[in-house]
Amino acid sequence: MAALSPDGILLTGRVAVVTGGARGLGRAIAAAFAAFGAEVAVCDRVTPPAGDLAMTLDVRDPVAVEVFAGAVRERWGRVDVLVNNAGGTFHASFQGTSERGERTLVEENFTQVTGMIRRFLPMMGEGASIINVTSSEAHQAAPGFAIYAAMKAAVESLTRSLALELAPRGVRVNAIAPDALPTEGELAMRATVRAAEAGRSAAGRPGGAEAPPFEPVRLPPLGRLGEPSDAAAAAVFLAGDLARFVTGTTLHVDGGIHAAGGWRRV
Ligand SMILES: NC(=O)c1ccc[n+]([C@@H]2O[C@H](COP(=O)([O-])OP(=O)(O)OC[C@H]3O[C@@H](n4cnc5c(N)ncnc54)[C@H](O)[C@@H]3O)[C@@H](O)[C@H]2O)c1
């Protein structure tokens, strides 16, 4: 039986790729990986912070992703950790979402993930780890975010299937489902939900506005919001040797929101 060592948490010498690394959870994950000893390649559609390798690209663009993969291959020849963190949405009812808007959400939250895995998997071997960042909304109804939530649920399903397909070659595949971790993206989303709510009150007709008359829980059961480093801590665990027997699962980093279901702290 292999003894556990504090060193098991370290990522010394591992090569990690993080998408959406310019801000929010992606930036926290990339910084934590570096702090735990990994060499980190980040990409983002806005200029990413300086990493061991940093590229500005849109992960929906297969040609740009191929160039990124080529740069990683040339620099290290392998990848030990791939974090598919980039993603996002806008707030609108299903009927208020055009087919073009729907395609954008599918590409932004699903097909770019399969595209990243396709291009980086050939560089991943025994002991490597894929971490897909999903959302608590993959596990519950999400009025105003229907397509986004469906795509995050699709990524969760993909996570489980790939965990089995890749188990024979020793590559683990897991998801982190965050919620209530304030970032620019998360705060902007909460603001648009509140603005829609205010618009409805002003109009005096519940449900009359474009967005559905629901809002997400404001306070997780733990009684406070989390922070990006909470997702980073989960990513460090899933990336390293301490998680060597963990695959095909989802780590909820949400202060208890997923567990709470219909229960709200008062
Ligand atoms: N913060 C939370 O509580 C929370 C909750 C649920 C899900 N999430 C998920 O966590 C992930 C990170 O979210 P965040 O809160 O840090 O959001 P954020 O908007 O603050 O940061 C996302 C980063 O990803 C980049 N990005 C987005 N789409 C991209 C693309 N197509 N190509 C390249 N870069 C792209 C953005 O430029 C940005 O830098 C997302 O997948 C999001 O859906 C976060």
Image: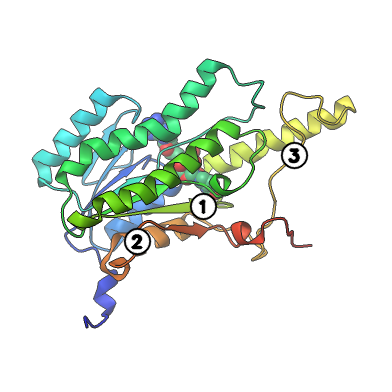
CB-based contact (under 8 Å), mark 3 and mark 1: no
Element carrying mark 1: strand
Q: Is residue 103 above or below residue 221?
A: above
Residue at 48% across, 36% down? 151
Spatial separation of the CA atoms under disc 3 and disc 1: 20 Å
Label of residue 214 in the image = 3
Q: Crowding at label 2, few (<14), some or many (≥20) Cα neighbours within 10 Å?
A: many
Residue bearing mark 1:
178
Element carrying mark 2: helix
Amino acid tagged 2: Leu
Spatial separation of the CA atoms under disc 3 and disc 2: 33 Å
Residue bearing mark 2:
238
Residue at 43% across, 45% down? 157
State the quadrant of the C terminus. Answer: bottom right
User: Which callout, 1 or 2, points at the residue further toward the start of the chain?
Assistant: 1
Which corner quadrant of the image does residue 200 belong to?
top right
Which corner quadrant of the image does residue 144 belong to?
top right
Q: Does the residue labelled 1 lie within 8 Å of ligand 1?
A: yes
Amino acid tagged 3: Phe
Residue at 20% across, 63% down? 12
Q: In this view, does 5 lie above or below 254?
A: below
Spatial separation of the CA atoms under disc 1 and disc 2: 14 Å
Amino acid tagged 1: Pro
Residue 121 appearing in the image: yes
In the image, 177 versus 198, the foreground residue is 177
Residue 46 appearing in the image: no
Q: Is mark 3 within 8 Å of ligand 1?
A: no
Q: In this view, does 179 lie to the left or right of 112?
A: right
User: Which callout, 3 or 1, points at the residue further toward the start of the chain?
Assistant: 1
Q: Crowding at label 1, few (<14), some or many (≥20) Cα neighbours within 10 Å?
A: many
Label of residue 226 in the image = none
Element carrying mark 3: loop
